[in-house]
Amino acid sequence: MDKPESVKCEWKDLPLFLLRGFDIPDMRRDITKVSNVKWLLRNIRVKNSTHERLDETIDLLKRQLKNLRTPKSS
């Protein structure tokens, strides 16, 4: 039997992962706000320590934070 392919996701898809299966407050799901991303990076492990996509989601949150902090050039 073939192994299932690993599913890769990008930071733009992160809200879908946060909406599915993670126990986080609704008010913190808007990852376009630096304050929410920082809060999630500090607190997402508290109620989600066994979630199968936790490490991947944390990596994507870190990328999102970097994207939000990087000034946009015109």
Image (cartoon, rainbow, N blue to C red):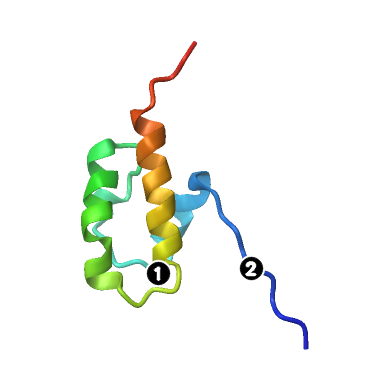
Q: Quadrant of the N terminus?
A: bottom right
- Which residue in the rendered view is the most extreme toward the top? 74
Say if mark 2 contacts mark 1, CB within 8 Å: no
The relative height of residue 36 versus residue 51 in the rendered view (above or below) is above
Residue at 21 percent of width and 55 percent of height: 42
Residue at 63% in and 68% down: 6
Of 42 and 22, the residue lying toward us: 42
Q: Position of residue 46 (x, y in %)?
A: 21, 69
Where does label 2 land, which residue? Answer: 6
Q: CA distance from mark 2 to mark 1?
A: 18 Å
Residue at the far right: name it.
1
Which residue does the numbered mark 1 point to in the structure image? 21
Q: Nearer the viewer, residue 12 or 3?
A: 3
Residue at screen point 27% across, 53% down: 41
What kind of residue is marked 1? Gly
Q: Earlier in the sequence, mark 2 or mark 1?
A: 2
